[in-house]
Every structure is written in structure tokens, then in C-alpha cells.
Image: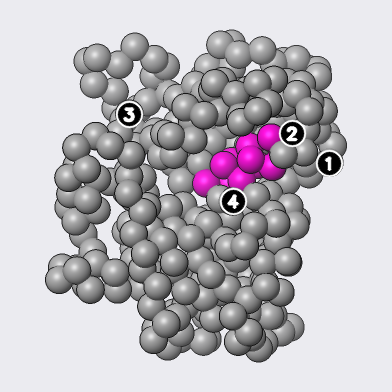
Amino acid sequence: MNSKTTLSLTLPPQGGGDKRRNKLCPYNMKFSKATIIKQVPQTPELTHIEVECDASILKSFTTPGQYVGISSSNDRTRFLKYYAMSNPPGEKHFSFLIKNTGEAAKNILDPWYRSQGKPLTQNSVASRILNQQGSSPKPTSVGDKKNPLLISEALGNGFATSQTSDQNILLVGVGSCFGVFRSLILHFFSTLKKPQITFLYGAKTAEDIPYQKDIETWEVGAGSKPAQRMQFLPSLSRPNKNWNGLIGHVQTHFDSVLINAQTSAYLCGMKEMIEDCQKKLAQKGVSPHSIFLNY
């Protein structure tokens, strides 16, 4: 795709959440038309999408943790929302893990559901998952050349991955933050010889955990490199009676994993959670210089 131009856009303040549309950026930003080429529902609330866009935009993504702004093609004055990539740098498309609710979902996901004869709802997403009778979520091609999205070049500094050793990597996140950690995990598996990763992840229920096929691969060992392994430790806030795993806030389970002065910790989530994690990590001897955020 070669359609690109410049656009004045709204940039998020550091650490922003859904309120990242407050100030008009004083400079011009590259953007291109983008087409969703695949959707894979992950949970009733989260969907994985893959987006085709201009090569120059893809090349601007150099570090896991960076994000882009996405807008509908009929509104060039602002972005609907900012999304961190869930694929590692260097691929031929962008991937994102997006929520199925809100204004962004209406403009990004709703066109596909309407093409199937029904609007986007929580039930329509859930039914796509349940109708697969427990099988892995099936991808759906949703390219819409007539109504493309607009996507910015990669923004932000991302995670400081160059400072990470092979051993003792800790990831802590919740909800849709899984997407940015998927990018980081795949990056580590391709750049480090023997990464030993522990991922503490918070979700409401077991059904709210995305990328379960990826998790199975990572826990066994990635591809032909069995030394690359991830320990996945989900903690649920609304577990059912059959749940035997962790329960409650992820940062209350730091005693369940190896954390010491050699730990490199990566955090993504709500401000309060991150601040609590930083305090608990410091108590265990982790230097502030070994605690990384993607902003």
C-alpha cells in the first residue's frame, strides 16, 4: 500500500489510558491507509486483528511496546484510540489485541459484523467463539478496501529491551496488555539465546485469557529452541469453583516467582498497579533501572 500523507494528530501524555486525546500535536505525522486483513476472536471481550499498511509505517516500528494511532477514513481530525502492536518488529503487517467495546470497536470491528448481517455486540463475539466448540479461534479475512482505516507511524520509545540479559525476565500485566507482552515475548525469543521468562497475568476468568495457543507453545519451548521457555502464571479476580491457580491482584503473588537483583521486570497496566509493582520489586532488590515501562 502506497497511500501516505501527513496529519496533525492528538498525542497521548505519558502513562495515559483511554484519555489520551487531549492536546493537538504541533507537528505533522506520517500515516497511511490500512486494511484489516484478519480477525481472530480471543475472548468474549478481546479480538486479535492483523492490519495491512504502507511499508514505511511498518518500518517505523522498531521496539516492542511502541504504539500507533488508528482512525476511521471518514474522520482525519483525530484518532479513535492508540494501540500497542502485538507482533514483534520486522513483520509484514501490524497485529493488535483490541477490546470489543467502545467507540474504537464500533469503527474497527463493527463493519465486519454488519457484513455478516448483525451489528457488533458482546454476544456476537462470544457466539463466534462458542460456536467453534472449544477449538482454537478461527481467523476471518475482513479486508475492506472501500472503507480503509488510517494508521499513524509508530509512536513512543517502547520497552528498553537492549538492557535485558537472557536470564530472569519478569512480565506483569492485565487484560489487553497481553498484546504488548506478546510482542515482547516473540522479540525475546528471536533475539536472546536462553530467555527465561515469567509472565504474571491478571484476568477476570479463565475464559478471559487470550492467545492460549501461543501460551501452550511458549510454555513448552519455542520452535527449535527448547531453552526458550516461558512460565505463565495467570491470576483471576472472578474464578469458578474449579480454578486451582492464583487469585487476586497480580502484584500480590511476587513471592510465587524468583525475583532478585538480577531480575529485569516489564510492567503494563493501570497506574496504581504499576506503582504498587514498583514498590514491591524495590523491596526485593530490583533496581529502578531494571524496571521497564513502554512509555
- Label 2 residue SS: strand
For mark 3, does the 10 Å Cα neighbourhood hold few (<14), some (14 to 19), or many (20 or more) residues?
some
Residue at point 56% right, 50% down? 86
Indicate left or right for 8 with 36 as reference: right
Label 4 sits on what residue type?
Asn
Q: Earlier in the sequence, mark 3 or mark 1?
A: 1
Farthest residue in the front direction?
224
Q: Determine which residue is flagged by label 2.
A: 291
Label 2 sits on what residue type?
Ile
Q: Determine which residue is flagged by label 1.
A: 162
Residue 243 visible here: yes
Which percent across, then down, holds residue 229?
A: 63, 23
Indicate left or right for 127 with 196 as reference: left
- The Cα–Cα distance between marks 2 and 1, rounded to whole angstroms, is 13 Å
Marks 2, 1: nearer the viewer: 1
Marks 3, 2: nearer the viewer: 3
Residue at point 23% right, 21% down? 240
- Label 4 residue SS: loop
Marks 2, 4: nearer the viewer: 4
Q: Determine which residue is flagged by label 4.
A: 87
Label 1 sits on what residue type?
Ser
Indicate left or right for 201 with 191 as reference: left
Q: Earlier in the sequence, mark 3 or mark 2?
A: 3
Front residue of 25 and 134: 134
Q: Earlier in the sequence, mark 3 or mark 4?
A: 4
Please give the range of residues in magenta.
179-189
Q: Determine which residue is flagged by label 3.
A: 206
- The Cα–Cα distance between marks 3 and 1, rounded to whole angstroms, is 33 Å
Which percent across, then down, holds residue 141?
A: 37, 64
Indicate left or right for 197 with 251 as reference: right
